[in-house]
Image: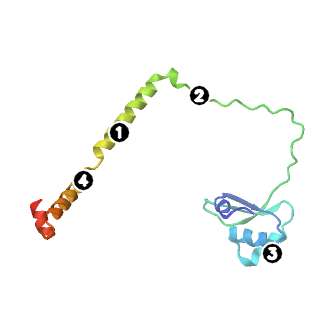
Amino acid sequence: MASKHIKRNTYYTFAFNLSDAESVYTVSLHLQLDPRNRRLLGSLSPGTCLFRQTQTSWNNAMLCKIDYVQPARNIGPIEYESQPYTPAVSLSESPHVLADLDAAIKEHNKTVKRQKPNHKLQLEQLSLQLLKLAALNPYAPVARLFERL
């Protein structure tokens, strides 16, 4: 049995003859079949299946007949076309890439420093000054201490 995640993300579903109750129940839920049609899954002849395609205008299950095609035997060696690709270039062959990367990193670090808020430092300094005044004047209200700041 496939996981629920895999079943939810399949685009084409072919359900051939099923005999056990758990598979019939799972497939009928996945194909969104009417419960009265579950017996159909156990009576499908060879080459006949229920087919459902998602992400189309008609995503209901339908009866489908698949023609038997004999597999090709002894066709000889298979030659594949070569895939076009761009060969990799080492960094020693392109020093301008390293220079551009260093410049981008420096610019990023400057931007991060420039955007870093100094508000936290100001709050820490203010709180330390308030604590010093409170230590020197233990009986003064906090509102008067803030007036002195």
Q: Amino acid at mark 1?
A: Asn
**Residue 2 screen position, x and y as percent:** 72, 61
Q: Nearer the viewer, residue 111 or 14?
A: 111
Residue 17 is at least partly visible in this image: yes
Q: Amino acid at mark 2?
A: Thr
* Real-space CA distance between mark 3 and mark 1, rounded to the nearest whole angstrom: 67 Å
* Real-space CA distance between mark 4 and mark 3, rounded to the nearest whole angstrom: 71 Å
* Real-space CA distance between mark 2 and mark 1, rounded to the nearest whole angstrom: 33 Å
- The residue wearing badge 4 is 119
Name the side, left or right, on which 34 lies relative to 46.
left
Q: Amino acid at mark 3?
A: Arg
- The residue wearing badge 3 is 39
Q: Earlier in the sequence, mark 4 or mark 2?
A: 2
- The residue wearing badge 2 is 86
Q: Earlier in the sequence, mark 3 or mark 1?
A: 3
Which of pointers 4 and 3 indicates the residue nearer the eye? 4
Q: Residue at x 39, y 35 (%)?
A: 105
Please rate how many residues cluster around mark 3, counting C-alpha atoms within 10 Å: few if below 14, some from 14 to 19, many from 20.
few
Q: Is residue 73 above or below residue 51?
A: above
Tell me which colouring the rendered structure shows. rainbow
Q: Residue at x 34, y 36 (%)?
A: 107
Which of pointers 4 and 2 indicates the residue nearer the eye? 4
